[in-house]
Amino acid sequence: MAETEIPEYFLCPISLEMMKEPVTAVTGITYERESIEQWLRKAKECVCPVTKQPLPRSSQYLTPNHTLRRLIQAWSEATNNAARGHGADHQQIPNPQLEKVQVEKLVKDLKVPHRNQRALKKLHGFAMESERTRTCMAEAGVANAMVIFINQRFQQGKTMCLEEALRILHVTWNIPSRTNMKALVGENLDFINSLTWILHLNVHNNNVKIVNEAMPLLKLTIQNTNSTILGNLNFQFFKEMVRVLGKRTISQQALKSTLQILIETCPLGRNRKSIVESGAVSNLIELELEKPEKNISELIFNLLAHLCSCAEGREMFLKHAAAIAMVSKRILRVSSATDDRAIHILSVIGKYSGSSEVVLEMLRVGAVSKLCMVIQADCASYLKEKARGILRLHSKVWSDSPCIQLYLLTRYQR
């Protein structure tokens, strides 16, 4: 069967594609809503693309063309039926305009046990459709409904439809709406506990897809939580974070979110101790040994610098055989931000944990040579001063070593 030609008046004059949500401008010309709204936002001269007559920029002057939409749907259905009869590909039937009342009905259905699964599947389909449908969902309070739904699943110990709920919440989170996300998720530990439970189940079962959905949401939640709540995070929370760090199959976004969560929470001394006790230091070193992307390395070194500011963190750092070698090797190889954090780590190690064994290891693995190179390198002056400060700490031990070239040793003041 020959491919059916789409009637010309079904096509948007801007995109030249069949319209799904036709709207008519004040000039009488009908366009696909998304195309004309984008034109109105971006055009230097706000004129009708067809007639060149002036147009108001506001989309409130666009009138839904219900008659044309019904004609397009009727034509599409007839074409589809004919195509199926001949075994041919069919035309896609445009979806009707999503109305707020439809979404509100689905949100109510979430509270009915025998309807909630179907309602969630429909909401998930709308969320994946377009920015317009997501905006409509946000205005109808879908984000609030998803938080409540996820919390209820946690309380009931049920896992069905969690992946869809997490994804819906993620894509509607930052869309302006009447929902105050900070008040919704940041004033108690309920939602954090729900997400921690989800991670516990799915990291253990190696369900990476749900972990990838949960971690960015947990990051957003932590960023909207006050310091009092952050100070009440339990050890299990940090244990799950470190378990996620150990998963090499998670997405880069999930990995970044995990590191950002730990950086956000570790300034509080109690949390920092929990992070260290959960085994984060060793995991971070192992992760950096794999030479990840620059932005991941910067986050790793940022977190390591925080953890090494406490005695427990430095102790765990020095227990890893490759720790000092890894830090020194990455200096001058990633970014100035990484250099800053790496030199800080060597500084606190040299100052507070500089036993004779540690000092000799810094020499043996090249940390001292790298610090000398920093002084000679084209980098910030404050980094050079930091490097000089570390070299002064144990200069008597290091200056007699044949491993250090004489010209490097003579170029800093003791």
Image (tube, helix red, strand yellow):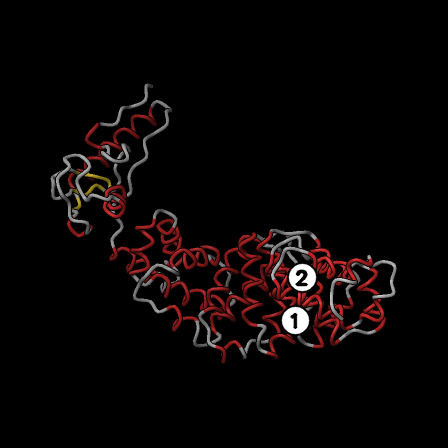
> Relative to residue 27, is residue 254 depicted above or below?
below
Which mark, by number, is residue 318?
none
Q: Are marks 2 and 1 in contact (CB under 8 Å)?
A: yes
Q: Which dot marks residue 284?
A: 2
Considering depth in this image, is 341 or 280 the residue closer to the camera?
341
**Is 247 on the left or on the right of 232, as rendered?**
right
At which x and y percent is residue 171?
40, 55
Residue visible at 49% across and 71% down in the picture = 155
Query: Residue 307 got which mark?
Result: 1
Badge 2 or badge 1: first in the primary sequence = 2
Distance from disc 2 to disc 1, alpha carbons, whole Å, reads 11 Å
Q: Tell me the amino acid under the disc marked 1.
A: Leu
Quarter of the image for the C terminus: give it: bottom right
Residue found 85% across the figure and 72% down from its top: 356
Q: Note whether 40 is above or below 358 in the view shown.
A: above
Front position in the image: 221 or 334: 334
Residue furthest toward the top?
Answer: 2
Q: Amino acid at mark 2?
A: Leu
The residue carrying pointer 1 sits among few (fewer than 14), some (14 to 19) or many (20 or more) residues within 10 Å by Cα, namely many
Q: Quadrant of residue 116?
A: bottom left
Residue at image location 65% in from the left, 76% down from the top: 273
Whole-percent x, y for residue 24 in the image: 16, 42
Q: Residue at x 67, y 61 (%)?
A: 284
User: Please, what secondary structure does the residue beneath circle 2 have?
Assistant: helix
Give the side of residue 128 with respect to residue 53, left or right.
Answer: right
Q: How many marks?
A: 2
Quadrant in which the N terminus appears? top left
Percent x, y of residue 34: 27, 44
Tag 1, which secondary structure?
helix
In-front residue for pair 339/163: 339
Up-down relation of residue 95 to residue 390 (above or below): above
Q: Is residue 331 above or below residue 197?
A: above
